[in-house]
Amino acid sequence: MQWNELDQQSCSMARTLSVIGDRWTLLILRDCFLKVRRFDEFQARLGIGRPILADRLQKLVDGFVLTKVAYQQNPTRYEYRLTQKGLDLHPVIMAIVHWGDVHMAGRKGRPLLHLHTSCGHQFDPVQVCSVCAEVLDPRAVQVLSGPGAARPDSTPSERVKSARTARRAKAG
Amino acid sequence: MQWNELDQQSCSMARTLSVIGDRWTLLILRDCFLKVRRFDEFQARLGIGRPILADRLQKLVDGFVLTKVAYQQNPTRYEYRLTQKGLDLHPVIMAIVHWGDVHMAGRKGRPLLHLHTSCGHQFDPVQVCSVCAEVLDPRAVQVLSGPGAARPDSTPSERVKSARTARRAKAG
DNA sequence: ATGCGCAGTTCCAATTTGGAACCCGCGTTG
DNA sequence: CAACGCGGGTTCCAAATTGGAACTGCGCAT
């Protein structure tokens, strides 16, 4: 499977990763949530190569995660802002950061804290069930195939298996 | 910034990405949550190259996200299972899948549905504040620097800026 | 007219990936 | 007992991606 085939797959994770599943993209998005908006600022904060940064920003714009908004004329310059689709990635970012806080923090503790301005407290993100509001336990979640599930022909696994079989047949 | 410098950074996101921020790693983990445990099964389902799969599994084991458990002797064969640290990635996976369900589903709807066995309903994951249990709105979250924040010397941005300055000085 | 800030693009070298083939231990089959 | 197949990798090379430095282009300030 090539990287660009990912969005063809009938898996929401694979499709999401075709947009955000890149080395740099999530770091760019983290900075977007921290109000970073301009090319050079991203470049300086991340230490990313300029060509790759240009490419990733373009892909995020193409994917409607960011939009370019003119912030001055003569010459016209743009800044990058999260769309609603981009803002909806907030839980993803928070979940990743929280895991890092719990499992990867150094001796000195976590580098950033989150303050919930609605309640005024420092908090952690918690994932709950949209129906019963209970905290989600992985063991209490069953996965069922939905209406958009794979067409029965040619899943990746079948393609690989038949390739193997073909090789063996050829070899023997 | 090289990929292997990521875990040095004082940012929980960067540190997390040093473990899971790879093209394939999240897809491997998705399959782990779907009870896939063996090399060939990962390989067949994902269509990933065998060398890369071997490398990623090894890195996940090194990072204590997966463990190898012997499931037979003669020859001894191992399967890969999530550790507690790995199980803790469940919210990350769910958040990503949910975003894909909302923003990337095809005409036919979402490929997978989630059933909460505790309450018996099909559900979506929702992120709430650990203190007040309100649904989190990105605009209601403030970020503060914590005890593990960057030492004042040599942030990535400063390194890049001084590199730029140095180049200019050299050029001029 | 010269330099500067910003937002990129071009170019080449160094890494990383993809894919096929090969290897190894062991149990089974002929 | 030789060949075969399975599970789980490793080796090797070609192709794609990345990193890094330098260059471009625009208009304003000097």
Image: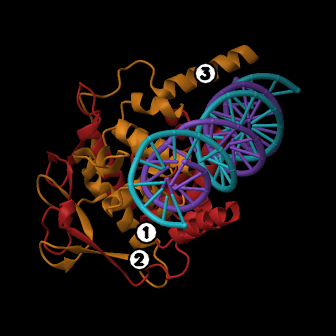
Chain colours: A red, B orange, C cyan, D purple
Q: Secondary structure at mark 1?
A: helix
Q: Judge if badges 2 and 3 mark residues of a common chain.
A: yes
Q: Secondary structure at mark 2?
A: loop
Residue at mark 2? B111
As drawn, is A31 to the left or to the right of A107?
right
Q: Secondary structure at mark 3?
A: helix
Asked if the residues shown at circle 1 and circle 2 are in contact, with their CB atoms under 8 angstroms apart, the answer is: yes
Residue C19 spot, x, y in % from top left:
66, 56
Instruction: Name which residue lies at 44% across and 65% down.
Output: A85
- Name the chain letter of the residue that bears numbered label 2: B
Residue A165 spot, x, y in % from top left:
60, 67
- Name the chain letter of the residue that bears numbered label 3: B
Instruction: Name which residue lies at 20% across and 48% down.
Output: A124
Residue at mark 3? B163
Q: CA distance from mark 3 to mark 1?
A: 41 Å
Q: CA distance from mark 2 to mark 3?
A: 48 Å
Figure quadrant of the C terminus of chain A:
bottom right
As drawn, is A74 to the left or to the right of A121?
right
